[in-house]
Amino acid sequence: MGAIILSTEAYLDRETLTFFDVTLITLASFRMTRFFVYDSITKFFREQFYVAKVQRGGRVELEKAKTGPRRTMADLMTCPWCFGIWSASTITFFYLLTPIAYFPTLVLAVAGMASVLQVLSNIMTGANDK
């Protein structure tokens, strides 16, 4: 469906994408994937696809559903490889569809590069050795 929409409505043609555009989309996809799969701010969203199990002592633990759409979404929201495909597809679609998508893509790309630099900095300084 996205290909059909882009064939008639695209702002940019895929053949005109530059290396800069592809790099921007790649970094934005990386950051969006990390945002939904790992960041604590989206934990509430990921938890919507789990089933609560009350344990002894009133403790609540979350488990993935055994089957069905909730299981599929829980798997998607915990797998960076799986979510990355959807993230890249969404960002690429909107980047090609409208010039309005450039700014959010740029923001996500800059945040993605900042994440990469932070991880490299932690590795070089040994900050992860705690």
Image (cartoon, grey):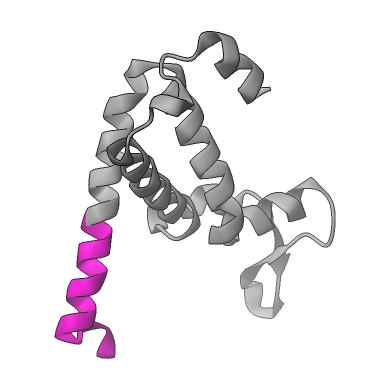
Q: What quarter of the picture does the C terminus occupy?
A: bottom left
29 lies left or right of 110: right
100, above or below 118, in the image: above
92, above or below 13, in the image: below
118 lies left or right of 112: left
Q: Residue furthest top?
A: 8
| Image coordinates for residue 54, horizontal then vertical, percent | 71, 68
What residue is rendered at 20% in x and 87% in y?
A: 126
Q: Residue furthest left?
A: 125
Is 41 in the magenta? no
User: What stretch of residues is rendered in magenta?
Assistant: 114-130
Prevailing SS of the magenta stretch:
helix
Q: Can the viewer see residue 96?
A: yes
Is 123 in the magenta? yes
Which quarter of the picture shows residue 81? Answer: bottom right
Question: 60 or 44, which lies in front?
Answer: 44
